[in-house]
Amino acid sequence: MKTATDNAIDGTIINKFRARAAEEGLLDVAYTSADSPFGPLLLATTKRGLVRVGLPNQDPDELLVDLADRVSPRVLEAPAELDEARRELDLYFDGKLDHFDLPLDWRLSSGFRQRVLRAIDRIPYGQTRSYTEMARKAGNERAVRAAGSACGSNPIPLVVPCHRVLRTGGALGGYGGGLPMKQALLELEGVLDDKSSS
Amino acid sequence: MTPLPPFQTVLDEHSAAVMGILRGAVGRDGAEDCFQETFIAALRAYPRLEDARNLRGWLLTIAHRKAIDHHRANGRRPIPVAEVPETAAENGVPEPDERLWAAVGALPPKQRAAVALRYGSDLRHNEIAAALGCSPEAARRSLHEGLKRLRKELG
């Protein structure tokens, strides 16, 4: 007996479905995977803008389940919707882009955390700030620990450059993608001496 | 309540089954359009779906309705026989012949769908019931009636 799994679906049928979903405004969350020097990234966008960047050490399936839960279950793989984000990230990793020009969707953060992240978004390329400064910018200088956890929960890392936030005194602090990645990003931006660690 | 998985997961897991029943129900040519209609309708309704436990049955129900729409739009012409997915012969089931599928295509809609879902898509009674929106008992009856009629027609 022929089983249903033998009814293979031609890729063009799925592409047509994606295109029509976008056309009819049903693509609430579009995502794709993108290469980076650190491993694959997950990129997800809503109609408002980039909503999630998943770093290589994060499980993309978990991130998609979270997006389905917190944004909309209409989550579909649709690489074309993320062409511009992918292009800018490629240039950034090549050291050829010092300012992302992508619309952002901030809905995965709120309150103090979102204020911290918006302050981080304004740190220029190649510069760093301390967690204390970010807490102050967000309106509560004493909430340094909360500012640190806002960085840690950044839903749009790389583009919202939480890697530019260091401990007072210059220690690296933490990074969702792991400290070697934070170090490499700061080297790329010329903040840390290139290969200072080798 | 089971949370709704990302729709991409639904598409990945069930698109082959949906295509299977559609090819059985409307033939290869009509199946692609019905497939698009089915998944667009499903995507549109998805956030309001209250129970994520039987996504396959839910999708097959939509697919079945789209197949009926297709037949209505085409004046209930018989299914294009040569395009029907094959039932393999390896476990003793004979290859489908044109007469057989023409006879299946001529069955009343519920019986035709039950036969196509059982033998074209290898669904169980409860899955056929979910796809047809009826009780498993009614699905069994439709299948039984359909098979009885086929035996009579094909002698």
Image (spheres, coloured by chain):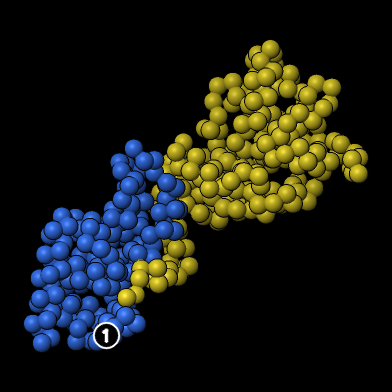
Chain colours: A yellow, B blue
Chain letter behind tag 1: B
Q: How many marks?
A: 1
- Name the one closer to the observer, A81 or B110: B110
Image height check: is B66 above or below B42? below
Instruction: Give the residue displayed 78% in from the left and 41% down from the top.
Output: A180
Q: Residue at the front extreme?
A: B91
Q: Where is residue A124 in the image (x, y as percent from the top left)?
A: 76, 33
Instruction: Give the residue displayed 84% in from the left and 22% down from the top.
Output: A169
Image height check: is A135 above or below A47? above
Q: Is residue A110 left or right of residue A40?
A: left
Label 1 crowding class (10 Å Cα cut-off): few <14, some 14-19, many 20+? few
Q: Quadrant of the N terminus of chain B?
A: top left
Type of amino acid under label 1: Pro
Q: In this view, does A63 lie to the left or right of B139?
A: right
Instruction: Give the residue displayed 28% in from the left and 53% down from the top.
Output: B58
Q: Position of residue A187 (x, y in %)?
A: 84, 41
Q: Can residue A145 be seen at all in this image of the molecule?
A: yes
Q: Position of residue B115 (x, y in %)?
A: 20, 71
- Name the one closer to the observer, A141 or B131: B131
Q: Can residue B109 be seen at all in this image of the molecule?
A: no
Q: Is residue B106 left or right of residue A133?
A: left
Image quarter for residue B154?
A: bottom left
- Name the one closer to the observer, B96 or A91: B96
Q: Position of residue A198 (x, y in %)?
A: 91, 44
- Name the one closer to the observer, B102 or A15: B102
Image quarter for residue B87?
A: bottom left
Q: What element carries label 1?
A: loop
Instruction: Give the residue displayed 66% in from the left and 22% down from the top.
Output: A147
Q: In which quarter of the image is the C terminus of chain B?
A: bottom left
**Which residue in the protein does label 1 denote?**
B94
Q: Is residue B106 left or right of residue A150?
A: left
